[in-house]
């Protein structure tokens, strides 16, 4: 939070052209958008791993299959975060 106040003070201390202000707004908006995009996959991966550990504890003989399925689920869920990162880059340009 302190870093954001320093950025606001620094932005107010200099005179910026409308183009620079637009670029600054786009960069901060893109960062905020990526932060929101990372929340869903973070929750999803946490839920997925928790349930997988629970399944492995209940049926240890099926741990190999559960682990394989868990890693596939993590990969697909992480793809959502990567898509959010690509959108972050595209908005920032």
Image (spheres, rainbow, N blue to C red):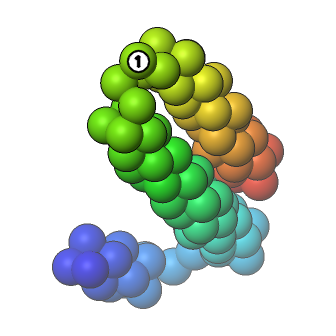
- Quick check: can you spot residue 27? no
Rendered residue at 70%/44% (across/down): 80
Judge from the rendering whether residue 4 lies leftward or rightward of residue 90; answer left or right: left
Q: Is residue 43 above or below residue 90?
A: below
Q: Nearer the viewer, residue 55 or 19?
A: 55
Judge from the rendering whether residue 45 lies leftward or rightward of residue 22; answer left or right: left
Where is residue 71? Give x, y as percent: 54, 23
Give the image quarter of residue 31: bottom right
Counting other residues with Cα less than 10 Å from the Cα at mark 1, is it few (<14), some (14-19), or many (20 or more)?
A: few
Where is residue 91? Give x, y as percent: 77, 54
Give the image quarter of residue 57: top left
Where is residue 28? Give x, y as percent: 57, 67
Rendered residue at 56%/53% (across/down): 44
Picture mark count: 1
Q: Nearer the viewer, residue 15 or 39?
A: 39
Element under label 1? helix
| Residue at mark 1 | 61
Q: Nearer the viewer, residue 64 or 46?
A: 64
Give the image quarter of residue 24: bottom right
Rendered residue at 64%/40% (across/down): 77
- Quick check: can you spot residue 72? yes
Image quadrant containing the N terminus:
bottom left
Rendered residue at 43%/77% (across/down): 11
Q: Is residue 60 above or below residue 54?
A: above
- In the orientation shown, which residue stands out farthest toward the left? 2
Where is residue 43? Give x, y as percent: 50, 59
């Amino acid at each position: 939070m302190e870093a954001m106040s320093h950025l606001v003070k620094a932005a107010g201390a200099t005179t910026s052209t409308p183009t620079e202000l637009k670029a600054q707004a786009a960069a901060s908006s893109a960062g905020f958008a990526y932060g929101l995009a990372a929340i869903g996959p973070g929750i999803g991966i946490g839920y997925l791993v928790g349930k997988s550990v629970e399944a492995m504890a209940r049926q240890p003989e099926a741990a190999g299959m559960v682990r394989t399925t868990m890693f596939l689920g993590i990969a697909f869920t992480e793809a959502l975060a990567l898509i959010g990162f690509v959108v972050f880059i595209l908005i920032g340009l």
